[in-house]
Image (cartoon, grey):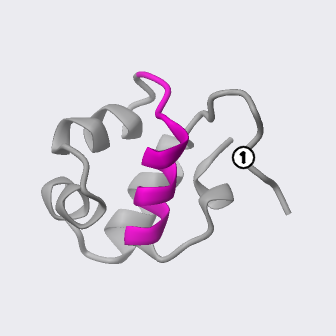
C-alpha cells in the first residue's frame, strides 16, 4: 500500500477526475464536500500545482477513498 511521504504529494489528476465523475459530482460539489475551492479541484485535475497533504486528505475523505489512491 502506498503512503503519502514526507515530500509534497502529486495528485493523479486523471484519477481524481475519474473518481469525481463516477460519483456524479461536479467540481463545485466535490469542492464543497471537501472544504476546498472549486479552482483547487480544477487545477489538481489538470496537473497544476502541488497540494498540501491536508488537501489530499480532504479530497480523499469526500470521495471516500484512501488518500494514497489520489497520489502518483
| Image location (x, y in percent) of residue 19 | 44, 66
The image shows residue 21 at horizontal and vertical percentages of 33, 67
Task: Please name the residue shown 25% across and 75% down the image.
Answer: 24
SS for callout 1: loop
Q: The C terminus is located in which quarter?
A: top right
Point out the stretch of residues depicted in magenta: 49-62
Q: Is residue 50 above or below residue 13?
A: above
* Residue nearer the viewer, 16 or 55: 55
Tell whether position 60 is magenta. yes
Using the rendered view, name the quadrant where residue 58 is placed.
bottom left
Check if residue 15 falls in the magenta segment: no
The reply, left or right, for residue 70 in relation to residue 28 is right
The residue tagged 1 is 4
Name of the residue lying farthest toward the right: 1
Residue 65 placement: quadrant = bottom right
- Which residue lies at the image location 81% right of the left edge and 55% below the top edge? 2
Q: How many marks?
A: 1
Seen at 78% across and 52% down, the residue is 3
Q: Nearer the viewer, residue 53 or 45?
A: 53
Label 1: how many Cα within 10 Å (few below 14, some 14–19, many 20+): some
Q: Main secondary structure of the magenta part?
A: helix
In-image side of 18 versus 37 (left or right): right
> Taking 53 as reference, is 68 left or right?
right
Residue drawn where x is 38% and y is 32% of the image? 46
Most extreme residue toward the left is: 28
* Quadrant housing residue 25: bottom left
Task: Indicate the quadrant containing the N terminus: top left, top right, bottom left or bottom right.
Answer: bottom right
Amino acid at each position: 500500500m502506498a503512503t503519502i511521504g514526507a515530500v509534497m504529494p502529486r495528485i493523479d489528476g486523471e484519477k481524481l477526475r475519474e473518481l469525481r465523475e463516477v460519483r456524479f459530482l461536479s467540481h463545485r460539489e466535490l469542492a464543497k464536500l471537501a472544504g476546498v475551492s472549486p479552482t483547487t479541484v480544477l487545477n489538481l485535475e489538470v496537473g497544476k500545482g502541488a497540494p498540501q497533504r491536508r488537501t489530499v486528505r480532504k479530497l480523499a475523505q469526500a470521495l471516500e477513498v484512501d488518500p494514497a489512491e489520489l497520489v502518483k
